[in-house]
Image (cartoon, rainbow, N blue to C red):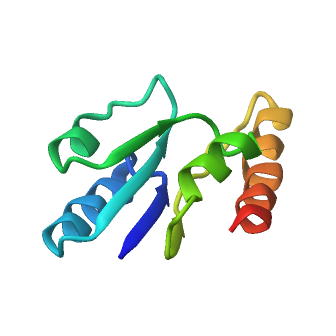
Amino acid sequence: MKIFITGGTDFIGTYLVNRLAQTKHELCCLARKTSNMQVLQDVHAKVIIGDFTDKTSLLQGMEGCDWVIHLASSFEFWARNNQVYNDVNITGNRNVMECA
């Protein structure tokens, strides 16, 4: 089974990626170019460099996938820039659902 994951380099995502890799699923993960991709490389996941606010990278990553697991989000208690928070948590989530 081929699984597309957003947020695979974050706290929960790294545990999920490692667990799914043990079950021999084919993994494809969306990651920002600033992300630490070591966990993805260690499990031989296909890495799509992009952003889930951009539908092109989502569609590229989801191509041929059986499942989508969306874990990425922006989290800040006192956000200095509400636009970034909205772009990620509203537009990004909408894009993932529309592309899936």
Residue drawn at x 73%, y 36% is 79
Residue drawn at x 33%, y 30% is 36
Question: In the displayed structure, does residue 87 sit left or right of residue 17?
Answer: right
Question: In the displayed structure, does residue 8 sit left or right of residue 16?
Answer: right
**Is 71 or 63 nearer to us in this picture?**
63
Quarter of the figure that contains the N terminus: bottom left
Q: Is residue 7 above or below residue 15?
A: above
Question: In the displayed structure, does residue 36 sit left or right of residue 80?
Answer: left
Question: In the displayed structure, does residue 25 sit left or right of residue 88?
Answer: left
Across and down, in percent, residue 59 comes to 66, 52
Across and down, in percent, residue 6 comes to 51, 54
Total tally of numbered discs in the picture: 0
Across and down, in percent, residue 64 comes to 52, 65
**For residue 84, what is the image quadrant?**
top right
Observer able to see residue 74: no
Observer able to see residue 39: yes
Quarter of the figure that contains the C terminus: bottom right
Residue drawn at x 76%, y 28% is 80
Q: In this view, does 99 lie above or below 35?
A: below
Residue farthest along the top direction in this orientation: 34
Q: In this view, does 63 lie above or below 97?
A: above
**For residue 42, what is the image quadrant?**
top left
Residue farthest along the front direction in this orientation: 64
Across and down, in percent, residue 82 comes to 83, 37
